[in-house]
């Protein structure tokens, strides 16, 4: 089965949003019967109880590509796009947890 991007209309705000081929494949694999009815912003607002997480437009410190992040960047700290962040997570192994063993006598 081949999927193509489709434009849908949000039932809350009336804005148009794209239901991508990848999302359609996911819906098909999960055997969902209905198309999504809400855009990304309205879906986030519903999930957070009415709060919308602010997204900030910025430039990736690693590749220079424009991106959005779900926080307000702090001056002097690098901000990475999703791709560069995931690359960095693969390169740098997580810090080992400190052992909290208790000596018994």
Image (cartoon, grey):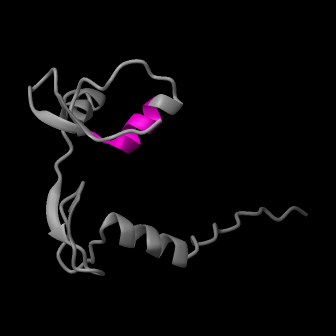
Please state the horizontal and vertical placement of residue 103, each as a whole percent of the image: 82, 65
Picture residue at 44% right of the left edge, 30% below the top: 27
Say if 4 sits above or below 47 in the image: below
Count numbered badges in the picture: 0
Please state the horizontal and vertical placement of residue 10, each as a whole percent of the image: 16, 26
**In this view, which residue lies farthest toward the right?**
105
| Residues in magenta, as a range | 19-27
Most frequent secondary structure within the magenta stretch: helix
**In this view, which residue lies farthest toward the left?**
14
Nearer the observer, 71 or 103: 71
Picture residue at 20% right of the left edge, 67% below the top: 73
> Is 25 in the magenta?
yes
Name which quarter of the figure residue 2 lies in: top left
Say if 93 sits above or below 39 in the image: below
Say if 73 sits above or below 92 in the image: above
> Is 81 in the magenta?
no
Please state the horizontal and vertical placement of residue 19, each as a whole percent of the image: 28, 37
Nearer the observer, 12 or 73: 12
Name which quarter of the figure residue 33 lies in: top left
Question: Which quadrant is the C terminus positioned in?
Answer: bottom right
Nearer the observer, 77 or 89: 89
Please state the horizontal and vertical placement of residue 22, each as a whole percent of the image: 40, 44
Picture residue at 18% right of the left edge, 61% below the top: 72
Nearer the observer, 100 or 60: 60
């Amino acid at each position: 089965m081949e999927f193509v991007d489709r434009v849908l209309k949000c039932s809350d705000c009336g804005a148009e949003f794209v239901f991508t081929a990848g999302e359609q494949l996911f819906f098909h694999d999960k055997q969902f019967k209905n198309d999504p009815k809400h855009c990304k912003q309205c879906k986030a607002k519903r999930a957070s109880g009415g709060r919308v997480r602010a997204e900030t437009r910025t430039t990736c410190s690693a590749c220079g590509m424009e991106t959005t992040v779900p926080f307000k960047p702090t001056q002097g700290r690098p901000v990475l796009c999703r791709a560069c962040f995931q690359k960095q997570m693969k390169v740098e192994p997580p810090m080992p947890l400190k052992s909290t063993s208790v000596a018994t006598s």
